[in-house]
Image (spheres, rainbow, N blue to C red):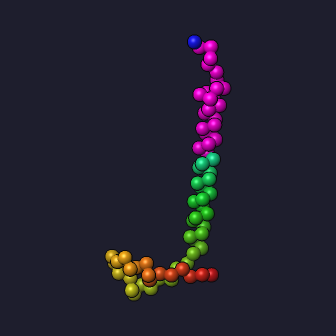
Amino acid sequence: MNENRSVFALDGVTGYLIAVVLLLSILAYLTVLGIGAQQNNATTYYKIDEKKLKTISTDNAKYYHVVSQ
């Protein structure tokens, strides 16, 4: 029964390495997307009209505008 076991089968070292490479590539992809989103938002400036803002209001979104560079 134990004749079919192999260290390099998919349930051995090879499968482990495939899983690690897959998880690291997903991590790298999501990190790049996150850094890109952060850089885009860090360079976007807003003009806010503070005098018209209320503490709890759904109309507050009308009082800030994106300032183009």
Q: Residue at x 64, y 21 (%)?
A: 6
Q: Is residue 63 magenta?
A: no
- The percent coordinates of residue 53 (x first, y second) are 38, 82
- The percent coordinates of residue 27 (x first, y second) are 59, 49
Which portion, as a residue range, is magenta?
2-24
Q: Residue at x 66, y 26 (%)?
A: 8
Which residue is situated farthest in the left direction here? 56
- The percent coordinates of residue 67 (x first, y second) are 56, 82
Left-right relation of 54 to 69: left
Q: Residue at x 58, y 64 (%)?
A: 37
Q: Is residue 44 above or below residue 36?
A: below
Magenta stretch prevailing secondary structure:
helix
- The percent coordinates of residue 59 (x first, y second) are 38, 80
Q: Is residue 62 above or below residue 36?
A: below
- In the rendered image, the quadrant that contains the C terminus is bottom right
Q: Is residue 16 above or below residue 1?
A: below
| In front of the other: 31 or 3 | 3
- In the rendered image, the quadrant that contains the N terminus is top right
| In front of the other: 62 or 41 | 62
